[in-house]
Image (cartoon, rainbow, N blue to C red):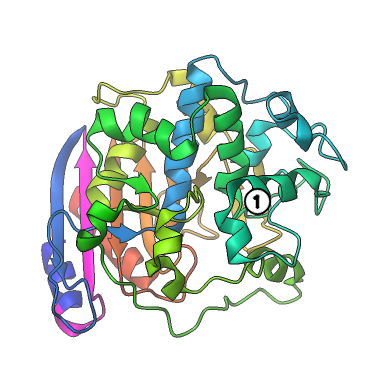
Amino acid sequence: MADELASRLSTGDDLGASIVVELDGQVVVDLWGGWRDEQHRCTWEHDSLVNVWSITKIATAVAVLHLADTGNIDLHAPVGRYWPEFTVNGKENITVAQVLSHTSGVAGWERPFTLDALYTWDEASTRLAAQTPWWEPGTASGYHAQNYGQLLGEVVRRTSGSPLRDYLAKHITGPLGADFEIGLNPRNHSRAAFLVPPQRTHPTFPPGFDSQLFQKTFTAPPIDAAVAMTTSWRAAELGAMNGHGNARSAVRIASMLHPDARQHVRLSQEAISAAFIPVSDCTDRVLGLPLRWGLGIAIADERTFPYLPAGVGVWGGWGGSLVVIDRKRHLTVAYVMNKMAPDIIGSPRAQAYLQAVYASLA
């Protein structure tokens, strides 16, 4: 694993990265290296942070599962029980679980929708509350790429009295000692890596796939990697995509989805089991990929994740970062980086690192 990372850093395939492997509750690999910037002025240190894009969704889902464990929400209750304004235009029966599993039909904002609106919590929530689902809720998945944290964050606010990022900090990352936050506090700006945008940003779709929902989801608002390094982005609460952390903190959060987690902050066996029960198994209407969704985590199979054992939990962030939760092997792995590949889920680099991890266990 160390040789694999060193080789890719030396060739420039990776610019800066961190990789952590936890086995049986113990960290057995903790690697970092490279550079936080293209000019090679700032080295990637043990506590460097990076915008991890959709790995943020794992943290958001864990926070919601934790809130369910407290009894404050019922995952199978309608969202409208906690957010009455949401119960209009065909959304009356959409459940919290359907949002967690990307099957609510409310996969994004209706256009036009601007960055300024995205950064304004009340406006963003009001817009979602007024919308009509894009397909019949519960019948298929469609990746909630940009609004996942808004939908679930509004439920968290209404039921706990705290913003999502505050709830996460108080109940999850703080007690775990996980160096992870939604947004980025100004005191941590000096530790943040600069993102290198991918050369290509549009995925390849299977023949015959209608990419209309992809266009709607990812252009309201349109986002490029440079936006993630602005003060406005870092100040916002975007529980779908502006989490900042590293592989170490991602593993600590994801490890809560292990039934035998040794951490003092845990989820119930019921919540963990629910996360891994398939809710939807189809070609995702937004991404065009066959995806099997549980509550807050995808469940790997050979169609989309041929390099992973079937049944493990997995998700990643735009550019190629990846988190894997293998309950059978008591294994959690995270890889994050700043040189982005054009992939939305994983990348050839992530695949190589994961293959090295599993080869070492053989």
Q: Nearer the viewer, residue 75 or 278?
A: 75
Is 37 left or right of 141, judged from the image as shown? left
Q: Position of residue 323 (x, y in %)?
A: 36, 51
Q: Quadrant where the N terminus lies?
A: bottom left
Crowd band around label 1 with a 10 angstrom C-alpha radius: few (<14), some (14–19), many (20+)? many
Residue 284 vertical position relative to residue 219 in the rendered view, above or below: above
Is 140 left or right of 30, judged from the image as shown? right
Q: Position of residue 313 (x, y in %)?
A: 44, 43
Residue 61 vertical position relative to residue 76 in the rendered view, above or below: below
Look at mark 1 in the image and give the residue it sits on.
Answer: 124
Pick out the residue farthest to the right: 89
Pick out the residue farthest to the top: 71
Q: Nearer the viewer, residue 266 or 157?
A: 157
Residue 17 falls inside the magenta stretch:
yes
Number of marks in picture: 1
What residue do we see at 63% from left, 55% from top? 143
What residue do we see at 55% from left, 31% from top? 156
Q: Where is residue 30 in the image (x, y as percent from the top left)?
A: 14, 51
Magenta span covers which residues? 10-24
Whether residue 86 appears in this view of the structure is yes
Where residue 28 sits, quadrant-wise, is top left
What residue do we see at 62% from left, 20% from top? 74
Q: Where is residue 247 in the image (x, y as percent from the top left)?
A: 26, 52
Element at label 1? helix
Q: Which of 127 and 218 is in front in this view?
A: 127
Specify the amino acid type for callout 1: Ala
Whether residue 355 appears in this view of the structure is no
What residue do we see at 11% from left, 68% from top? 3
Where residue 257 sits, quadrant-wise, is top left
